[in-house]
Image (tube, rainbow, N blue to C red):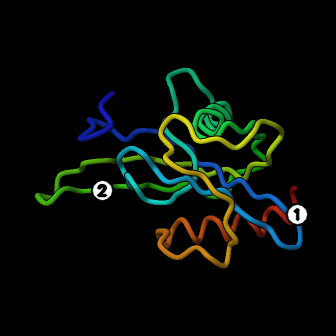
Amino acid sequence: MRREYPDAPIAGVGAVIVRGGDEPVVLLIRRGQEPLKGEWSLPGGAVELGETLEAAVRREVLEETGLVVEPAGIVQAFDRISRDAHGRVRYHYVLVDFLCRVKGGSLACASDALEARWVDPRELDGLTPLTVEVIRKAIQMAVAVI
């Protein structure tokens, strides 16, 4: 299925990976591909045919960051729709973001990620408002789940 100018929405997953207790940090990546190429965001990507959402988030995180994660709950589901200058839908993803905990691996960029870094949740300038909202919600969940 084409990602750019698709015939139907594409299912995707994102991972809000939170580390630490009293002073939590969240993992961000700088995207190497459209949409949002060059921008900081959460690791994630498209679900493959026959793959569960949980398997997809594990695979995407491993491919992009080298980390093995375990999904601990759904933070939020939403649409991300981008249109071109003529109003045509250029990208349409139905995304499910998961709170995840690190189970192993070593942080190293790969696949579609140009950079990866742990960020203080008070320093989320430059992220989309929805991404900031999802991160804040995940941190609140992390206190109870992780």
Instruction: Please tell me how many numbered marks the rendered image carries.
Output: 2
Residue at x 66%, y 56% (from the top left corner): 27
As drawn, 56 above or below 115: above
- Camera-side residue of 122 and 133: 122
User: Mark on residue 82?
Assistant: 2
Figure quadrant of the C terminus: bottom right
Q: Residue furthest left?
A: 86
* Precedes in sequence: disc 2 or disc 1: 2
Judge left or right: residue 121 versus residue 63: right
Category of crowding for the residue at label 2, using alpha-carbon neighbours closer than 10 angstroms: few (below 14), some (14–19), many (at least 20): some
Provide the secondary structure element on which disc 2 rests: strand
The numbered disc on residue 144 is 1
Tag 1, which secondary structure? helix
Q: CA distance from mark 2 to mark 1?
A: 34 Å
Q: Nearer the viewer, residue 33 or 51?
A: 33
How busy is the neighbourhood of tag 1: few (under 14 within 10 Å), some, or many (20 plus)? few
Please give left or right for residue 117 compared with residue 33 in the image.
right
| Place of residue 16 in the rendered image (x, y in percent of width and height, measured from the top left) | 67, 55
Q: What amino acid does circle 1 point to? A: Ala
Q: Name the spot of residue 10 as percent of width and height, x first.
A: 41, 38
Q: Is residue 6 above or below residue 81?
A: above
- Position of 80 relative to 112 (above/below): below
Q: Are dots 2 and 1 in contact, CB under 8 Å?
A: no
Q: In percent of the image, x 88 and y 66: which residue is there? A: 21
Pick whichever, 92 or 31, lies toward us: 31
Question: Taking 12 as reference, is 140 left or right?
Answer: right
- Residue 129 position in % (x across, y down): 49, 73
Tag shown at residue 45: none
Residue type at mark 2 is Ser
Q: Residue at x 80, y 67 (%)?
A: 24
Which quadrant holds the N terminus? top left
